[in-house]
């Protein structure tokens, strides 16, 4: 199911592919500072016990411990993510009632304020609120993590998904649970980090070929 969503519960313990892109497919990042700021924003608002806005915490130099320690009262868990030039993907688990909705509202509003201020622009940055697809089973969950991590490879930004800095794939390779990503469920389903890498690479060329075919089909209908 795909739809816009704010102010509703998605079901505690349920998993969702959350995604959105820039208005008119415009870029939502101009440089590495913007990518880093969105990751900081995502990390900061995972905790429902945050004491202030991210901008205030950064001015007081209180943001760093909030970004490196585990949330005291998490409202969502992140199982995979990838930031692309004009869109993003998150694989989220709802931890508290309505947690994903509150989390996404805070993240998108905060980042939009930052981006508009930094780049001297006004108006919406994202195309609507956000879109989501509910994950129905383990197989879909595992395949979704692969789809998310292959985004920069399919887009021909990198020739190896491991070299892309703005995704959670490094946590999967290192089997490392961080505030921004918990890869343990996907790695358990795959069997090991090595198995997961094989699972990813085995599909990579096929995924890139599918994207090429899709673009050719679009060109032919224009």
Image (spheres, rainbow, N blue to C red):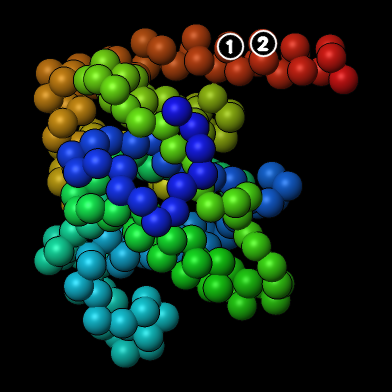
Residue farthest to the bottom? 60
Q: Give percent across and percent down for residue 57.
A: 32, 83
Q: Quadrant of the C terminus?
A: top right
Residue neighbourhood size for the residue with mark 1, other residues' Cα within 10 Å, grouped as few (<14), some (14–19), many (≥20): few
Measured along the vertical axis of the image, is residue 125 above or below residue 212? Answer: below
Q: Are marks 2 and 1 in contact (CB under 8 Å)?
A: yes
Choose between 143 and 18: the one closer to the eye. 18
Query: What distance separates the C-alpha of mark 2 from that of mark 1?
Result: 6 Å
Counting from the top left corner in percent of width and height, residue 99 is at 28, 55
**Residue 120 higher or lower than 215, as above or below:** below
Q: What secondary structure is found at the residue carrying circle 1?
A: helix
Looking at the image, residue 163 lies above or below residue 41: above
Residue pictured at 47% horizontal, 70% vertical = 110
Relative to the observer, which residue lies in front, 76 or 102?
102
Say what secondary structure mark 2 lies in.
helix
Residue 79 visible: no
Along the horizontal axis of the image, is 13 left or right of 142? left
Q: Is 70 placed above or below 204 here?
A: below
Numbered circle sitting on residue 209:
1
Give x and y (percent) for residue 8.
36, 51
Residue 74 left/right relative to 23: left
Where, quadrant-wise, is the N terminus in this rendering? top left
Q: Which mark is residue 144?
A: none
74 on left or right of 113: left
Q: Is residue 143 visible?
A: yes
Viewer-closest of 163 and 186? 186
* Within-10-Å neighbours for mark 2: few <14, some 14–19, many 20+: few
Task: Name the residue at the right extreme.
Answer: 222
Which residue occupies 71% across, 72% down?
Answer: 121
Q: Which residue is mark 2?
A: 213
Residue in view at x 18 percent, y 59 percent:
74
């Amino acid at each position: 199911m795909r739809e816009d969503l704010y102010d509703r519960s998605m079901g505690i313990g349920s998993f969702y592919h959350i995604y959105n892109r820039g208005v008119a497919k415009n870029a939502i990042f101009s440089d590495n500072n913007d990518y880093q700021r969105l990751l900081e924003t995502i990390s900061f608002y995972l905790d429902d016990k945050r004491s202030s806005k991210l901008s205030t915490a950064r001015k007081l130099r209180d943001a760093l411990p909030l970004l490196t320690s585990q949330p005291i009262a998490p409202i969502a868990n992140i199982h995979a993510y990838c930031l692309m030039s004009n869109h993003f993907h998150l694989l989220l688990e709802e931890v508290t009632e309505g947690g994903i909705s509150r989390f996404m509202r805070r993240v998108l509003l905060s980042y939009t304020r930052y981006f508009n201020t930094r780049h001297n622009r006004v108006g919406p940055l994202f195309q609507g609120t956000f879109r989501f697809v509910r994950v129905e089973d383990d197989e879909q969950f595992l395949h979704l993590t692969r789809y998310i991590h292959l985004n920069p490879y399919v887009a021909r930004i990198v020739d190896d998904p491991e070299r892309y800095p703005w995704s959670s794939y490094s946590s999967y390779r290192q089997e490392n649970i961080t505030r921004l990503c918990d890869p343990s469920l996907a790695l358990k389903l795959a069997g090991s980090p090595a198995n997961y890498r094989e699972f990813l690479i085995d599909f990579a060329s096929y995924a890139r070929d599918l994207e090429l075919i899709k673009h050719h089909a679009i060109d032919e209908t224009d």
